[in-house]
Protein backbone atom coordinates (compact mmCIF):
# COMPACT_ATOMS: atom_id res chain seq x y z
CA UNK A 1 0.00 0.00 0.00
CA UNK A 2 1.22 3.56 -0.72
CA UNK A 3 1.45 6.44 1.76
CA UNK A 4 -1.97 7.85 0.83
CA UNK A 5 -3.68 4.52 1.50
CA UNK A 6 -1.78 4.06 4.76
CA UNK A 7 -2.92 7.50 5.92
CA UNK A 8 -6.53 6.62 5.10
CA UNK A 9 -6.18 3.42 7.15
CA UNK A 10 -4.96 5.42 10.11
CA UNK A 11 -7.88 7.86 9.82
CA UNK A 12 -10.64 5.25 9.64
CA UNK A 13 -9.28 2.36 11.69
CA UNK A 14 -6.41 3.75 13.76
CA UNK A 15 -4.02 1.34 12.05
CA UNK A 16 -0.33 2.19 11.76
CA UNK A 17 0.60 -1.36 10.77
CA UNK A 18 -1.00 -4.70 10.00
CA UNK A 19 -3.39 -5.48 12.89
CA UNK A 20 -3.25 -8.53 15.09
CA UNK A 21 -6.00 -11.09 14.73
CA UNK A 22 -8.40 -11.45 11.84
CA UNK A 23 -8.48 -8.79 9.15
CA UNK A 24 -9.40 -8.06 5.55
CA UNK A 25 -8.04 -4.87 3.99
CA UNK A 26 -9.54 -3.70 0.69
CA UNK A 27 -7.83 -1.06 -1.48
CA UNK A 28 -9.19 0.30 -4.78
CA UNK A 29 -11.54 -2.63 -5.23
CA UNK A 30 -8.94 -5.34 -4.58
CA UNK A 31 -7.77 -7.33 -1.58
CA UNK A 32 -4.68 -5.79 0.01
CA UNK A 33 -4.32 -8.32 2.82
CA UNK A 34 -6.27 -10.95 4.73
CA UNK A 35 -5.80 -13.12 7.79
CA UNK A 36 -8.03 -15.65 9.51
CA UNK A 37 -7.48 -17.05 13.00
CA UNK A 38 -8.30 -20.29 14.76
CA UNK A 39 -11.75 -18.95 15.72
CA UNK A 40 -12.48 -16.42 12.96
CA UNK A 41 -12.57 -17.35 9.27
CA UNK A 42 -12.75 -14.79 6.45
CA UNK A 43 -13.62 -16.12 3.00
CA UNK A 44 -14.45 -14.57 -0.36
CA UNK A 45 -18.10 -14.76 -1.34
CA UNK A 46 -19.08 -17.46 -3.82
CA UNK A 47 -22.56 -16.16 -4.74
CA UNK A 48 -21.34 -13.76 -7.42
CA UNK A 49 -21.39 -10.69 -5.17
CA UNK A 50 -18.29 -8.72 -4.31
CA UNK A 51 -17.40 -9.11 -0.63
CA UNK A 52 -16.59 -11.54 2.15
CA UNK A 53 -18.17 -13.83 4.72
CA UNK A 54 -16.84 -13.58 8.27
CA UNK A 55 -17.56 -16.71 10.32
CA UNK A 56 -16.98 -16.52 14.07
CA UNK A 57 -17.09 -19.72 16.07
CA UNK A 58 -19.33 -20.04 19.17
CA UNK A 59 -17.60 -19.07 22.39
CA UNK A 60 -15.03 -16.75 20.76
CA UNK A 61 -14.00 -14.14 23.34
CA UNK A 62 -11.90 -10.97 23.36
CA UNK A 63 -10.96 -11.15 19.68
CA UNK A 64 -11.24 -8.51 16.96
CA UNK A 65 -11.90 -8.28 13.23
CA UNK A 66 -10.68 -5.35 11.09
CA UNK A 67 -12.27 -4.87 7.64
CA UNK A 68 -11.32 -1.34 6.44
CA UNK A 69 -11.74 -0.12 2.85
CA UNK A 70 -9.67 2.61 1.17
CA UNK A 71 -10.12 4.26 -2.23
CA UNK A 72 -7.43 6.45 -3.76
CA UNK A 73 -8.39 6.04 -7.42
CA UNK A 74 -10.66 8.83 -8.62
CA UNK A 75 -13.86 7.67 -10.29
CA UNK A 76 -13.95 4.23 -8.67
CA UNK A 77 -17.45 3.06 -7.73
CA UNK A 78 -18.14 -0.16 -5.87
CA UNK A 79 -20.73 -2.06 -3.85
CA UNK A 80 -19.36 -4.56 -1.33
CA UNK A 81 -21.41 -7.16 0.57
CA UNK A 82 -19.97 -8.39 3.89
CA UNK A 83 -21.89 -10.91 6.01
CA UNK A 84 -21.02 -11.69 9.64
CA UNK A 85 -22.06 -15.03 11.11
CA UNK A 86 -21.45 -14.79 14.85
CA UNK A 87 -21.99 -17.90 16.92
CA UNK A 88 -23.48 -18.15 20.39
CA UNK A 89 -21.78 -16.82 23.51
CA UNK A 90 -19.17 -14.65 21.75
CA UNK A 91 -17.61 -11.35 22.84
CA UNK A 92 -15.89 -9.58 19.93
CA UNK A 93 -15.03 -6.19 18.42
CA UNK A 94 -15.41 -5.43 14.71
CA UNK A 95 -13.71 -2.37 13.20
CA UNK A 96 -14.87 -1.30 9.74
CA UNK A 97 -14.95 2.00 7.87
CA UNK A 98 -14.07 3.55 4.54
CA UNK A 99 -11.65 6.28 3.53
CA UNK A 100 -11.62 8.04 0.15
CA UNK A 101 -8.82 10.18 -1.30
CA UNK A 102 -10.05 11.88 -4.45
CA UNK A 103 -7.80 14.27 -6.37
CA UNK A 104 -9.61 13.88 -9.68
CA UNK A 105 -12.73 15.24 -11.33
CA UNK A 106 -14.81 12.04 -11.22
CA UNK A 107 -17.08 10.84 -8.45
CA UNK A 108 -15.70 8.16 -6.11
CA UNK A 109 -18.34 6.03 -4.41
CA UNK A 110 -18.38 3.18 -1.92
CA UNK A 111 -21.50 1.34 -0.81
CA UNK A 112 -20.87 -1.15 1.98
CA UNK A 113 -23.72 -3.53 2.77
CA UNK A 114 -23.05 -5.30 6.07
CA UNK A 115 -25.36 -7.97 7.49
CA UNK A 116 -24.95 -9.31 11.02
CA UNK A 117 -26.36 -12.59 12.33
CA UNK A 118 -25.59 -12.41 16.05
CA UNK A 119 -26.05 -15.64 17.99
CA UNK A 120 -27.70 -16.21 21.34
CA UNK A 121 -26.11 -14.35 24.28
CA UNK A 122 -23.29 -12.93 22.16
CA UNK A 123 -21.86 -9.41 22.56
CA UNK A 124 -20.62 -7.38 19.61
CA UNK A 125 -19.06 -3.93 19.44
CA UNK A 126 -19.08 -2.57 15.89
CA UNK A 127 -17.10 0.57 15.03
CA UNK A 128 -17.48 2.25 11.63
CA UNK A 129 -15.76 5.48 10.55
CA UNK A 130 -16.10 7.31 7.24
CA UNK A 131 -13.58 9.88 6.03
CA UNK A 132 -12.85 11.75 2.82
CA UNK A 133 -10.07 14.00 1.54
CA UNK A 134 -8.41 15.24 -1.65
CA UNK A 135 -8.15 18.51 -3.57
CA UNK A 136 -9.93 17.33 -6.70
CA UNK A 137 -13.38 18.42 -7.91
CA UNK A 138 -14.79 14.89 -7.88
CA UNK A 139 -17.34 14.08 -5.19
CA UNK A 140 -16.84 11.56 -2.40
CA UNK A 141 -19.98 9.48 -1.88
CA UNK A 142 -20.63 6.79 0.73
CA UNK A 143 -23.88 4.89 1.19
CA UNK A 144 -23.49 2.36 4.02
CA UNK A 145 -26.25 -0.14 4.75
CA UNK A 146 -26.36 -2.23 7.91
CA UNK A 147 -28.77 -5.11 8.61
CA UNK A 148 -28.77 -6.56 12.12
CA UNK A 149 -30.42 -9.75 13.36
CA UNK A 150 -30.06 -10.23 17.12
CA UNK A 151 -30.89 -13.64 18.57
CA UNK A 152 -32.18 -14.18 22.11
CA UNK A 153 -30.10 -12.36 24.73
CA UNK A 154 -27.69 -10.92 22.15
CA UNK A 155 -26.17 -7.46 22.62
CA UNK A 156 -24.78 -5.18 19.91
CA UNK A 157 -23.21 -1.75 20.27
CA UNK A 158 -22.77 0.20 17.03
CA UNK A 159 -20.63 3.37 16.93
CA UNK A 160 -20.57 5.26 13.63
CA UNK A 161 -18.76 8.48 12.81
CA UNK A 162 -18.53 10.77 9.77
CA UNK A 163 -16.87 14.11 10.40
CA UNK A 164 -15.00 15.12 7.26
CA UNK A 165 -14.89 15.03 3.50
CA UNK A 166 -18.05 13.15 2.47
CA UNK A 167 -20.11 15.10 -0.05
CA UNK A 168 -23.17 12.86 0.00
CA UNK A 169 -24.25 9.96 2.16
CA UNK A 170 -27.36 7.89 2.81
CA UNK A 171 -26.90 5.76 5.92
CA UNK A 172 -29.45 2.96 6.23
CA UNK A 173 -29.82 0.64 9.23
CA UNK A 174 -32.40 -2.09 9.75
CA UNK A 175 -32.56 -4.30 12.84
CA UNK A 176 -34.78 -6.96 14.39
CA UNK A 177 -34.45 -8.07 18.01
CA UNK A 178 -35.46 -11.36 19.61
CA UNK A 179 -36.29 -11.84 23.30
CA UNK A 180 -33.99 -10.00 25.76
CA UNK A 181 -31.80 -8.69 22.93
CA UNK A 182 -30.29 -5.19 23.19
CA UNK A 183 -29.19 -2.78 20.47
CA UNK A 184 -27.32 0.48 21.15
CA UNK A 185 -26.56 2.79 18.22
CA UNK A 186 -24.49 5.97 18.57
CA UNK A 187 -24.02 8.16 15.50
CA UNK A 188 -21.88 11.29 15.05
CA UNK A 189 -21.97 13.37 11.86
CA UNK A 190 -20.59 16.72 10.75
CA UNK A 191 -21.35 18.31 7.38
CA UNK A 192 -20.14 21.53 5.76
CA UNK A 193 -20.17 23.28 2.41
CA UNK A 194 -23.05 21.87 0.34
CA UNK A 195 -22.76 18.35 1.72
CA UNK A 196 -25.86 16.25 2.38
CA UNK A 197 -26.35 13.45 4.90
CA UNK A 198 -29.41 11.30 5.41
CA UNK A 199 -29.75 8.77 8.23
CA UNK A 200 -32.50 6.16 8.08
CA UNK A 201 -32.87 3.87 11.11
CA UNK A 202 -35.61 1.28 11.66
CA UNK A 203 -35.67 -1.17 14.56
CA UNK A 204 -38.24 -3.93 15.16
CA UNK A 205 -38.34 -5.14 18.75
CA UNK A 206 -40.07 -8.47 18.30
CA UNK A 207 -39.06 -10.36 21.44
CA UNK A 208 -40.21 -9.88 25.03
CA UNK A 209 -37.67 -7.94 27.08
CA UNK A 210 -35.85 -6.51 24.06
CA UNK A 211 -34.56 -2.93 24.06
CA UNK A 212 -33.11 -0.37 21.65
CA UNK A 213 -31.38 2.97 22.20
CA UNK A 214 -30.65 5.07 19.08
CA UNK A 215 -28.69 8.29 19.65
CA UNK A 216 -27.56 10.75 16.98
CA UNK A 217 -25.38 13.83 17.46
CA UNK A 218 -24.67 16.05 14.49
CA UNK A 219 -23.32 19.43 13.44
CA UNK A 220 -24.43 21.09 10.21
CA UNK A 221 -22.29 24.00 8.94
CA UNK A 222 -22.39 26.46 6.03
CA UNK A 223 -25.01 25.37 3.43
CA UNK A 224 -25.11 21.67 4.24
CA UNK A 225 -28.29 19.69 4.86
CA UNK A 226 -29.05 16.74 7.13
CA UNK A 227 -32.08 14.47 7.56
CA UNK A 228 -32.48 12.12 10.53
CA UNK A 229 -35.21 9.46 10.27
CA UNK A 230 -35.69 7.06 13.15
CA UNK A 231 -38.45 4.47 13.38
CA UNK A 232 -38.82 2.21 16.40
CA UNK A 233 -41.49 -0.48 16.38
CA UNK A 234 -42.44 -2.12 19.66
CA UNK A 235 -44.02 -5.45 18.78
CA UNK A 236 -43.78 -7.01 22.24
CA UNK A 237 -43.03 -6.06 25.84
CA UNK A 238 -39.97 -3.89 25.22
CA UNK A 239 -38.22 -0.56 25.78
CA UNK A 240 -37.16 1.79 23.00
CA UNK A 241 -35.55 5.24 22.94
CA UNK A 242 -34.48 7.46 20.05
CA UNK A 243 -32.69 10.79 20.42
CA UNK A 244 -31.40 13.38 17.95
CA UNK A 245 -29.33 16.38 19.09
CA UNK A 246 -28.10 18.74 16.38
CA UNK A 247 -26.16 22.01 16.25
CA UNK A 248 -27.05 24.17 13.27
CA UNK A 249 -24.73 26.91 11.99
CA UNK A 250 -24.56 29.45 9.16
CA UNK A 251 -27.13 28.67 6.39
CA UNK A 252 -27.40 24.93 7.09
CA UNK A 253 -30.63 22.98 7.62
CA UNK A 254 -31.50 19.92 9.72
CA UNK A 255 -34.65 17.78 9.76
CA UNK A 256 -35.29 15.33 12.61
CA UNK A 257 -38.18 12.91 12.05
CA UNK A 258 -38.65 10.38 14.87
CA UNK A 259 -41.44 7.81 14.56
CA UNK A 260 -42.65 5.44 17.28
CA UNK A 261 -45.12 2.60 16.78
CA UNK A 262 -46.40 0.53 19.71
CA UNK A 263 -48.04 -2.74 18.70
CA UNK A 264 -48.12 -4.16 22.23
CA UNK A 265 -49.59 -2.77 25.44
CA UNK A 266 -46.24 -3.31 27.24
CA UNK A 267 -44.17 -1.43 24.67
CA UNK A 268 -42.48 1.56 26.32
CA UNK A 269 -41.20 3.97 23.66
CA UNK A 270 -39.63 7.45 23.98
CA UNK A 271 -38.28 9.94 21.45
CA UNK A 272 -36.34 13.18 21.91
CA UNK A 273 -35.17 15.72 19.33
CA UNK A 274 -33.36 19.03 19.77
CA UNK A 275 -31.95 21.33 17.07
CA UNK A 276 -30.41 24.71 17.82
CA UNK A 277 -27.49 27.06 17.45
CA UNK A 278 -24.53 27.32 19.80
CA UNK A 279 -25.56 29.25 22.90
CA UNK A 280 -24.12 32.77 23.08
CA UNK A 281 -23.11 32.38 26.71
CA UNK A 282 -20.97 29.37 25.80
CA UNK A 283 -19.08 31.41 23.22
CA UNK A 284 -18.64 34.36 25.57
CA UNK A 285 -17.31 32.16 28.36
CA UNK A 286 -14.62 30.65 26.13
CA UNK A 287 -13.76 33.99 24.54
CA UNK A 288 -13.11 35.46 28.00
CA UNK A 289 -10.43 32.78 28.33
CA UNK A 290 -8.62 34.18 25.30
CA UNK A 291 -10.13 32.21 22.42
CA UNK A 292 -11.36 33.86 19.24
CA UNK A 293 -15.00 33.32 18.29
CA UNK A 294 -13.97 30.77 15.66
CA UNK A 295 -11.73 28.91 18.10
CA UNK A 296 -14.52 28.89 20.67
CA UNK A 297 -16.96 27.45 18.13
CA UNK A 298 -14.47 24.70 17.23
CA UNK A 299 -13.99 23.82 20.91
CA UNK A 300 -17.75 23.53 21.46
CA UNK A 301 -18.29 21.44 18.31
CA UNK A 302 -15.41 19.09 19.13
CA UNK A 303 -16.73 18.58 22.64
CA UNK A 304 -20.25 17.96 21.34
CA UNK A 305 -19.07 15.25 18.93
CA UNK A 306 -16.52 13.67 21.28
Image (cartoon, helix red, strand yellow):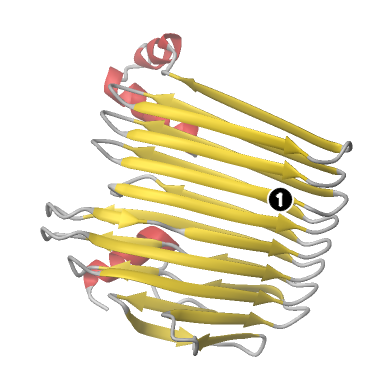
Q: Is residue 119 left or right of residue 1?
A: right
Q: Nearer the viewer, residue 13 or 17?
A: 13
Residue drawn at the location 51% of the way across and 35% of the way down: 217
Q: Is residue 183 above or below residue 282?
A: below
Q: In this view of the protein, can residue 2 be seen by the observer?
A: yes
Q: In terms of secondary structure, where does tag 1 sit?
A: strand
Residue of label 1: 204
Quarter of the image holding residue 214? top right
In this rendering, the answer to whether 133 lies above or below 26 is above
Up the image or down, 33 lies above or below 263; here it is: below
At horizontal 38% and vertical 42% (from top left) the residue drawn is 197
Quarter that holds the N terminus: bottom left
Total labels: the figure holds 1
In the image, 263: left or right of 224?
right
Above or below, 244 against 151 in this view is above
Residue 154: quadrant of the picture: bottom right
Amino acid sequence: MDLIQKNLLEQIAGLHEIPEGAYNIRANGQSAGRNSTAHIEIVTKTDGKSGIDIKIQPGTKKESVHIPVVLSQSGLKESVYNDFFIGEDCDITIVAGCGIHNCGVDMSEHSGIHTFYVGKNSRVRYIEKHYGEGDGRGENVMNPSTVIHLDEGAYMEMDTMQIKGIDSTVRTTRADLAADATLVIREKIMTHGTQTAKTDFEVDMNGAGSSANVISRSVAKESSHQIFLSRINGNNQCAGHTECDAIIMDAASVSAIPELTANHVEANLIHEAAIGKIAGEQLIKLMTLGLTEKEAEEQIVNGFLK
